Amino acid sequence: MTPGSTPAACAALLRRDLTLAWRRRGDIALPVLYAVIVVTLFPFALGPEPQLLQRIAGGVVFVTVLLAMLLSLDGLFRPDIDDGSMEQLMLAPQPLALLVGMKILAHWLTAALPLVVVAPVLASMLHLPPPAIVVLVVALAVATPLLSLLGAVLVALAAGAKRSGMLLALMLLPLCVPVVIFAAGAVAAAQDGLPWIAPIAWLGAGLALAVVLAPLACAAALRIAMDT
């Protein structure tokens, strides 16, 4: 890649964000620890009956992953706004939407991918059958990037507000309901031996649309927030 080119700038920004995240490894472990604690408490609260836990396993894992991702979502753009890095990104010759997309990718790699990796363990704790666990991982691999993109748009819209964590949660949860319904529906269909490709296809269509539109919306919202 030629130095100063758009691919080189995107790769450098991705490498920078991943390096900063690695220096704060405790922040990466916090959502995973939260998810493990929440899922561990369900058998104690509802009882150890495998049939009951199997029936709720898909929904419990998806809701837990969603709430765990909320823990790190507020810090997606806030550090760059506070230290002035966002102004430098806006002044860069590269398209702001591409640079924002790299930041969203870095957030997914550090906040959501560890949850996807630990999801089979969480599902096994709830006695989810192995075939359904495979569908669960596939659904999470499609749903979590979509959640990151949706969350990034809302974070950009609320970038000008101080202590926007509660506002962000209130705005994001209604948008996440269809994602959770389709993802948990795919797992439930796999448990019942029914076709589960259709819900995953709908999630994939939403992800493809969000990959194109979300960075553009984030860039426009960040410019408005920084101007004000």
Image: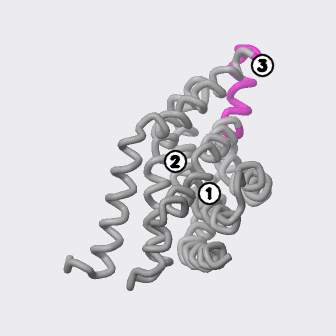
Relative to 43, residue 160 above or below: below
Whole-percent x, y for residue 188 in the image: 69, 43
Residue 153: image x %, image y %? 64, 67
Q: Residue at x 36, y 43 (%)?
A: 22
Q: Do the residues labelled 1 and 2 touch (CB within 8 Å)?
A: yes
SS at mark 1 in the image: helix
Residue ID for mark 1: 147
Q: What residue type is labelled 1?
A: Leu
Instruction: Magenta stretch: give its range.
Output: 45-59
The residue drawn where x is 57% and y is 43% is: 136
Judging by the rendered image, the residue that carries numbered circle 3 is: 46
Q: What residue type is labelled 2?
A: Ala
Q: Position of residue 59 (x, y in %)?
A: 71, 40
Asked which secondary structure carries label 3, the reply is helix
**How far apart are labels 3 and 2 at the CA level?**
27 Å
Q: How many badges with numbers are in the image? A: 3
